[in-house]
Image: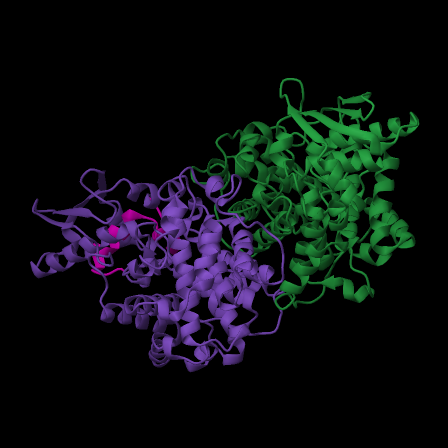
Chain colours: A purple, B green
Amino acid sequence: MATLQLATWATNLTYTDLTAPVIEAAVNSVYNWAGCAIGGYSQDAPHIAYATTQPFFGGPPTSSILGANGSISEAYVDAQLAALLNGIASHIDDYDDTHLETIIHPAGPVASALLAVAEWRGPVTGHEFLTAFVAGVEAECKLGLSVSPEHYDVGWHITSTVGSIGASVAVGKLIGLGTTQMQNAIGVAATQVVGMQEFFGSMTKSFHVGRAAQGGMLGALLAKNNYTSSLQSLEAKYGWLHVVSTRENATAYFDQLGEIWEIEKNTFKPFPCGIVLHPIIDAATQLHNETIQQGKDISSVKSINLQVNSEVLVLTGKTNPTTGLEGKFSVYHAAAVGLLYGEATPTYFTDEAVTNATVVEFREKVNITTDDERFGKDQATVTIEFDDGSTLERHIEHAIGSLENPLTDADLKKKFLDQVSRRIGEARAERAYAAFKGIGNMTDVGQLRALY
Amino acid sequence: MATLQLATWATNLTYTDLTAPVIEAAVNSVYNWAGCAIGGYSQDAPHIAYATTQPFFGGPPTSSILGANGSISEAYVDAQLAALLNGIASHIDDYDDTHLETIIHPAGPVASALLAVAEWRGPVTGHEFLTAFVAGVEAECKLGLSVSPEHYDVGWHITSTVGSIGASVAVGKLIGLGTTQMQNAIGVAATQVVGMQEFFGSMTKSFHVGRAAQGGMLGALLAKNNYTSSLQSLEAKYGWLHVVSTRENATAYFDQLGEIWEIEKNTFKPFPCGIVLHPIIDAATQLHNETIQQGKDISSVKSINLQVNSEVLVLTGKTNPTTGLEGKFSVYHAAAVGLLYGEATPTYFTDEAVTNATVVEFREKVNITTDDERFGKDQATVTIEFDDGSTLERHIEHAIGSLENPLTDADLKKKFLDQVSRRIGEARAERAYAAFKGIGNMTDVGQLRALY
């Protein structure tokens, strides 16, 4: 029933069903994803993945690598490789989007698969693209809600485990699957469960997103060709919901499809690191500014005391990160750079930054107290003590970037231009912004990559 | 610790460590896999997979599709596609091999990845190939033992969930990964958990095997290129063992690596269907012969009564299969064809066979009683009653094909020639048999495909 319900909703969805806030949220989600995919292509992970898979993926170059430099023709590979590489690149900086109730980063798996197929099978209009994108995001988030929090708590990386299913729904929608085919597509995607939390802090974390994009795309394409699967892959006794979760209530959430839009709850990360670090960085950067304003010297900070939710240590407890990727999962590193520099852009999560002597010294000043009664996952109190015994304290009720305290349009644009221009220069970054921000009005989204 | 232990054992393994029975078991496992992969290429599933992925996998044609007809040059694709297709084809008939303690079909994921890479990166000698193959099989079976039976009981298709890890170890061994790289390879493979039992009876069941082969290969190749992962992916709190199992004792089983060889326990299926059906078919075919010997008419059978382990109904309870693939998971169908025809070759598991009116009529005569105290999974009692009230009964203590009652060398050869000649003709089948049976002595296994 649940599988049929989802498949039916997705195949019937039309652009006119999308409300204005849904469309706006979708466009922001897509362009923020594009910024991450372009900026993230500076990292090693997507390049290793390219070099590794290049001997296989020599198909016609139909689909673009968003962050590739060089000539425009060099930016194109086949659709499966494009999905893998854009998926990796869009997640490698941990700077993407977040559906906070589930901690899903929704755009990566869905958009990476969808754009690759849209470029390959096009022309696809902006309306068609956004409709399919929303279908995929709603599918993955509703499914995520129905297994949260248990599914995440046992160690699955929910972004990719539901992401393959979201990608299959989005691609299935785009290529016009019927309901039964859509059920089969969901089945092939559901049986590929990629991603565990053990890989946080390594390149494999972002591999999850790329592989989910590939797996979901493959599910939709196989179903289109009448590859048989299961029509009840989600709810069956030995299907997805029961195998990967001890709790499931999918029908209850699927009943809300098209009524409560999860895409409207998508938020955007102000800092390129694990989401539970955001309230701490928010407080630390504010304390940096206050210290300066009071004419004090940051180097005179004696101790940094954090009061946080216990999940912070579970997910980001790395005391001695040695790579930038590990730094993204170190609460010690995050607090140190926030306080030292008053900001936490990608620059502060590089291999150099985490081994910087001053940063290492400051990490050792960090002490942590957990209190789940007082502190939710987006809350924190940071207290710093100076050599002279004086203290400063900041409590964050809702971290910047949360639903209650979201990035403004200007913030989001600034983030995009910053991350993208570091990769492809300012002029191209401005053009990329205009291109992705205007995606809804395009007659062929396959032209996107050529616009910047 | 467990990950390091496995990686260390695998990287240190040499051909001289393999005992004569291990080598014999390995060769039999490989050639039985090849027979399945050639014979299975008659099915739709690998052809749909080929057509679907062909737009992507246009890389240099380095690796062979074992069951491809046509010119020899048409048999070659890139290594990732070859792994997918040979994996699907080798499992689509449910006619492959079985490690009975875990119900893993070991060769499919490992050999499909390994041969594809050996052909691509060669020359690889027969000794190197078999050493890597054994490393992969031991890895997946020891890991399977350490999570059995709970992991299977919740619904995972263990062949593919451990298969990706086996494939990564085998390919990693072949391409000479160091221990740390091997740990990283295991990590990338482990985080891709493919396969649930809901897909039994559909093409997606064999997709699991092909995808596991691809995923494991990709893990080894990424690790070779220094893609970072986790060095403790198996045993970490949010790693493989804890996420996909409620029980794990990997170190205890890894301690036996190289002492107790799981490959020696690999068995070969006499019938192309779910393994729990084998004692029933064994009994039914014997009763067919006895009925004929007594001069009775099979059509005068009034009822067919089965006493079996309850797992038979869990895994193979489909009452009204409508496709050949579903028939492989219908105890009713299996009992009916065994009794009607006195054999159960692939011919009796086609779409035509399961919709044959006589077969359908006989399926309706089947009654089932379960009794887990009296019947293990390889045991069954079948009683048939005739119109005249007389009965015949057969009890199977150990089904043909089990460890206690294995196929003989002659049986295994007969099976290979039967399944392969139906696909590529008798003359080529004989050449293929000689080629794969002689794999251990080859100086370049990349020449295998050209030998038949």
Q: Position of residue B406 (x, y in %)?
A: 80, 30
Residue B15 lies in quadrant: top right
From the viewer's perspective, is residue A298 above or below residue B313?
below
From the viewer's perspective, is residue A295 above or below residue A200?
below
Q: Which residues are magenta?
A: A318-344
Q: Position of residue B443 (x, y in %)?
A: 82, 51
The quadrant of the picture occupied by the C terminus of chain A is bottom left
Q: Nearer the viewer, residue A12 or B122?
A: A12
Residue B237 lies in quadrant: top left
From the viewer's perspective, is residue A197 above or below residue A35?
above
Q: Nearer the viewer, residue A360 or B140?
A: B140
Q: Classify residue B225 as left or right of residue A434.
A: right
Q: Is residue B269 visible?
A: no
Q: Report if residue B83 lies within the magenta region.
A: no
Q: Classify residue B184 as left or right of residue B131.
A: left
Q: Nearer the viewer, residue B302 or B325?
A: B302
**How many callouts does the rendering have?**
0
Q: Position of residue A244 (x, y in %)?
A: 46, 42
Q: Is residue B71 visible?
A: yes
Q: Residue furthest top?
A: B373
Q: Classify residue B100 as left or right of residue A278.
A: right
Residue at 37% across / 79% down in the picture?
A: A441
Q: Classify residue A268 as left or right of residue A287.
A: right
Q: Report if residue A325 lies within the magenta region.
A: yes
Q: Position of residue B129 (x, y in %)?
A: 74, 47
